[in-house]
Amino acid sequence: MTANNIFESTHPLVAHKLTRLRDVETTPKKFRELVREMGALLAYEATQDLKLGKRQVTTPMGQTEGAELAEKLGLVPILRAGLGMVEGIWNLVPNAEVWHIGLYRDEDTLQPVEYYNKLPTAPTVDVCLVLDPMLATGGSAVATVDILKNWGVSKIKFVGLLAAPEGIAALNTSHPDVDIHIAKIDSHLNDIGYIVPGLGDAGDRQFGTG
Ligand code: PRP
Ligand code: URA
């Protein structure tokens, strides 16, 4: 992948945790912990260009000019699996707003089906991080970015754990303005739309279902 809006993490902690996440022996409890931690590490990379304003601060030793975030951040987990990525990022940016989008993939057509969207009429945030561990065909991510652009947000980034090249291409073709931050781009999709080597079903592994 050569586009300059696709960021595959090179961080050793991400690579280490991803290997444990993939492991078929990893329990749901540990899996949730890893998803939470990796979400935070990737969001740290994805937020490096947030705009700052100036803020005076009084320290015990005097005054200095400091900084504060000038853009309101929205976290947009795609239900269900994206939920596990929220908490770690929220710890870093406690005043971020969280707006849930419910989509599931029809298992026959692999097309996303929307079932939850309570966005208010006007946008309340400046920047959205779309959170989903898996970017497979890309259908769910493209649909979510469509929803957010219709809402009125123009600065949108996708933050995920594993992608197939097919999903990266689909999202980048439909929304070339959306940065993609991903722990790893895997080999391919199999004939039922799963990422290979992947980690299996990210929702089922977090929630102990399936
Ligand atoms: C998974 C995953 C993504 C989607 C990715 O969700 O969490 O949302 O599939 O596939 P795509 O790129 O081909 O759209 P799933 O539909 O299994 O729902 P779940 O999170 O509720 O398990
Ligand atoms: N959704 C998952 O949870 N895993 C995949 O490999 C593809 C889509």
Image (cartoon, rainbow, N blue to C red):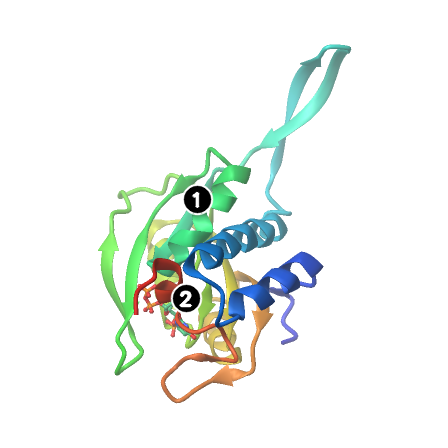
Left or right: residue 90 versus residue 45 is: left
Q: Is mark 2 within 8 Å of ligand 2?
A: yes
Indicate the secondary structure of the residue bearing disc 1.
Answer: strand
Residue 84 in picture, x, y percent from top left = 42, 53
Residue 202, disc:
2
Instruction: Specify the amino acid type for callout 2.
Output: Ala
Q: Quadrant of ligand 2?
A: bottom left
Residue 18 in picture, x, y percent from top left = 58, 65
User: Which one is earlier in the sequence, the residue at label 1 or at label 2?
Assistant: 1
Crowdedness of circle 2 by 10 Å Cα count: few (<14), some, many (20+)?
A: many
- Circle count: 2
Q: Residue furthest left?
A: 115
Q: Residue furthest right?
A: 61
Left or right: residue 81 versus residue 159 is: left
Residue 5, disc:
none
Q: Is residue 132 above or below residue 119?
A: below
Query: Are the residues flagged by discs 1 and 2 in contact, CB closer than 8 Å?
Result: no
Q: Is residue 28 above or below residue 197?
A: above
